Image (cartoon, grey):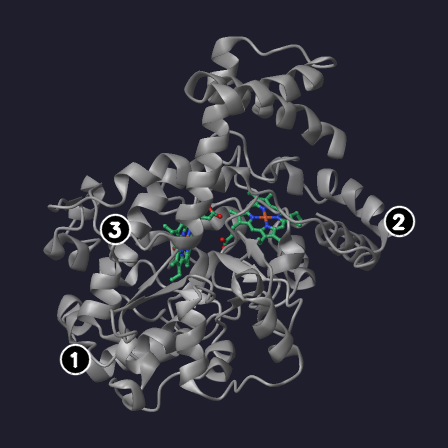
Amino acid sequence: MATQLGKPMRWRALALGAFVACCCSAFGLVRLAAAADDAEDSPALPANDQVIEANTEQMMSDGKRTFRYATFGDESWWGGTLGLHRAIEGSRFGGVGPGVSPATALAVGLKVDVDSLPPQLVAAIKNGKVDLNDPATTLGLLQLNAVVGVTGFFDSQGNLSSVGIQCALCHSSVDNSLAPGIGHRLDGWANRDLNVGAIVALSPNLTPIATLLGVDVPTVLKVLNSWGPGRFDAELELDGKAFRPDGTTSAVLIPPAFGLAGVNMHTWTGWGSVTYWNAFVANLEMHGQGTFFDPRLNDASKFPVAAAAGFGNVTGDADRITSKLAALQFYQLAIPAPQPPAGSFDLAAAQRGQTVFSGQGKCASCHVPPLYTEPGWNMHAPADICVDDFQASRSPDGRYRTSPLKGLWSHSQGGFYHDGRFATLGAVVDHYNACMNLGLSAQQRSDLVQYLDSL
Ligand code: HEC
Ligand code: HEC
């Protein structure tokens, strides 16, 4: 890996050296000299290749920053409209209610980025010297920009004046290196601990959501509290359907946002490409300020809430989203699925399971390695996989997207399939065995599970 990374790094040094030489000759000479040393074993890149290299670097850093830190102006919704920051600070700091302590924040699945904490604070947390039951500590963490996916805005007196959210809120976790919920960022991981509904339900003013959905505030609260950890319902604000016919929540599992390069249609039900969905989410779900266009949402019979609210054609004075979409997509596609931890599966069984996956199990006919989804149009009618059409019918195409399977081990919490209907991979395999009449033996099924755990 190190040698693979070595080359582009030197190329970048070259491009940078050349750039600096033009603008600032004294420093530039030093850079060029260093670059010349490096160039011995790697020839200088042609000019246009250098442009592409530099662009790659720029897109990566811009995209990462957007994914982690951009609120797209959505603080005007979360703070300004719903007043969520007032619930976070609590009445002691001028807000409402008891406030949100770090212990409460961690309990609803929020994560803390250890790399944003000064060393003294890390040491104090290690030694149990930080009061995790005091909302003041949460405000301190927000001031350090250390709460993953949440940005606090502070006025000149140091009071919390608003709060906004980021992609990282739902699609990042941490490695728990310091304590449970506190560690280094894991971008792209599905945060299956996060109770989005419980967090939104803290907002002092839910009337705007009630008005949008055409219901009362107690109903909004009932819906938000029905989601549970690891789930969110992106279609609620389109069709107003909060519950499945069996009375359980219509919120789906938060999917990972890694391992998506090469995958055509995205989301459980294939709404569009990564960049389509990013624009959708930033505008319609996060309530950022931007431009969004999708005439499919003007279908008032399928999407009554969206059609009435004009979600199919969003324009505004300020657009803080569109200019970020290119780099955001670039960064997301660069996030690989994580490797399973050593010893987390039985290698010999996994190897036998691979044979089942591509042979008798017929899995590879849809989950085509190494993408583990179909190259091309990766969508299926519900009957193809023997499931009901409730969630599929809430999307434009009425189908389910073949899930890419890499990194499955990292999001087993909450179960599998869009609604977590299968608690374990064993249950998924049993489902296919029955649905497709595969006739897999108990041994083959358990080998197949080991293979899935190895992806
Ligand atoms: C409140 C939680 C939440 C936030 C914030 C959020 N997402 Fe998502 N994301 C979801 C859920 C839930 C889905 C699945 C939606 C569905 O299928 O109905 C999803 C789906 C996706 C997918 C599709 C994954 C796949 O397997 O195809 C991508 C890509 C994605 N989100 C990226 C983003 C980006 C980029 C942002 C920031 C602009 C973002 N999300 C913000 C919850 C969230
Ligand atoms: C006809 C195409 C097709 C075949 C064949 C197929 N799958 Fe799937 N698979 C899908 C679709 C579509 C989904 C998405 C279901 C959903 O979102 O509810 C899926 C989802 C999954 C998931 C859940 C992923 C997640 O993130 O929750 C697993 C695991 C899986 N399949 C494994 C397998 C295995 C193992 C086999 C072979 C025994 C197999 N699949 C055969 C189409 C297929």
Say which element carries label 1.
loop
> In front of the other: label 3 or label 1?
3
Q: Residue at x 85, y 50 (%)?
A: 347
Q: Badges 2 and 1: C-beta atoms under 8 Å apart?
A: no
Would residue 184 be visible to someone looking at this image?
yes
Q: Where is residue 104 in the image (x, y as percent from the top left)?
A: 47, 83
Q: Which residue is drawn at 51% across and 77% down?
A: 106
Q: Position of residue 152 (x, y in %)?
A: 34, 67
Q: How crowded is mark 1: few (under 14 residues within 10 Å), some or many (20 or more)?
A: few
Q: How crowded is mark 2: few (under 14 residues within 10 Å), some or many (20 or more)?
A: few
Residue pointed to by mark 3: 283
Q: Mark 2 or mark 3: which comes first in sequence?
A: 3
Q: Distance between the residues labelled 3 and 1?
A: 24 Å
Would residue 52 be visible to someone looking at this image?
no
Pick whichever, 206 or 363, lies toward us: 206
Residue pointed to by mark 2: 348
Say which element carries label 2.
helix
> In front of the other: label 2 or label 3?
3
Q: Position of residue 338 (x, y in %)?
A: 65, 49
Q: Position of residue 83 (x, y in %)?
A: 23, 75
Q: Does the residue labelled 1 lie within 8 Å of ligand 1?
A: no
Q: Residue at x 43, y 47 (%)?
A: 65
Residue type, label 2: Ala
Q: Name above or below for residue 422 compared with residue 46.
A: below
Q: Residue at x 43, y 78 (%)?
A: 138
Lateral position of residue 366 relative to residue 395, left or right: right
Residue type, label 1: Asp
Say which element carries label 3.
helix
Q: Distance between the residues labelled 2 and 3?
A: 47 Å
Residue pointed to by mark 1: 216
Pick whichever, 391 or 308, lies toward us: 308
Q: How far apart are marks 2 and 1 (CA)?
A: 56 Å
